[in-house]
């Protein structure tokens, strides 16, 4: 007869494997991508470098802000049409951060979706300009966006 500690150990390892290692189904992957893309659309447009002025001594002054005349995405389908293959599940965010084992186990921060997209705006000459950008969106196991 197995001991209670062995049973608890097997249960804990099984839960860990299901929470951390188990592959994501194609359907769930698409739901995660949609949640991440919608987060990007809601926060659009992001702050970008508007102007850089070189001071000549190796230093510069950088001005950040919202691009003037930004063209918002009207829907998720428009976002996907303008940014095909925009989303992918990744292990780490841009700065190297990744969810801890406990975050993944408890479902607090389970997935990171990298969203590559174009920031669209009308330039001073009246033409539509695009600037490539990317965002790393962290999601819970349930698929909801977390704010960390």
Image: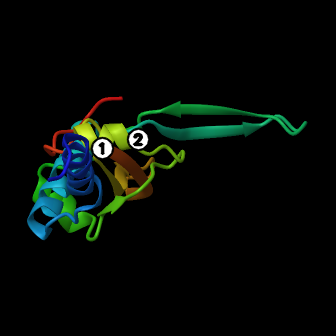
**Place of residue 83 in the rendered image (x, y in percent of width and height, measured from the top left):** 28, 65
**Place of residue 67 in the rendered image (x, y in percent of width and height, measured from the top left):** 42, 39
**Horizontal side, residue 8 vs residue 57: left or right:** left
**Horizontal side, residue 141 vs residue 123: left or right:** left
**Place of residue 91 in the rendered image (x, y in percent of width and height, measured from the top left):** 41, 56
Q: Quadrant of residue 98?
A: top left
Q: Residues within 10 Å of mark 1 (few under 14, many from 20)?
A: some
For the C terminus, the quadrant is top left
Q: Residue visible at 34% across and 52% down? A: 120
User: Residue placed farthest to the front in the image?
Assistant: 1
Residue that carries the numbered disc 2 in the rendered image: 100
Q: Quadrant of residue 116?
A: bottom left
**Horizontal side, residue 93 vs residue 35: left or right:** right
Disc 2 element: loop
Q: What is the basis of the colouring in this image? A: rainbow
Residue that carries the numbered disc 1 in the rendered image: 104
Q: Residue visible at 30% across and 64% down? A: 86
**Horizontal side, residue 116 vs residue 41: left or right:** right
Q: Which mark is residue 15?
A: none
Note whether residue 122 is visible: no
| C-alpha span from label 1 to label 2 | 6 Å
């Amino acid at each position: 007869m197995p001991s209670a500690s062995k049973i608890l150990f097997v249960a804990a390892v099984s839960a860990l494997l299901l929470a951390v290692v188990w592959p994501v189904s194609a359907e769930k992957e698409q739901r995660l991508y949609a949640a991440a893309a919608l987060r990007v659309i809601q926060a659009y447009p992001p702050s970008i470098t508007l102007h850089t002025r070189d001071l000549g001594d190796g230093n510069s002054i950088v001005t950040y802000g919202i691009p003037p005349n930004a063209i918002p995405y009207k829907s998720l389908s428009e976002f996907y049409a303008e940014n095909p293959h925009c989303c992918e599940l990744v292990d780490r965010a841009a700065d190297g951060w990744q969810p801890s084992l406990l975050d993944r186990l408890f479902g607090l921060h389970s997935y990171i979706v990298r969203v590559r997209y174009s920031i669209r705006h009308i330039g001073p000459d009246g033409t539509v300009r695009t600037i490539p950008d990317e965002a790393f969106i962290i999601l819970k196991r349930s698929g909801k966006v977390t704010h960390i």
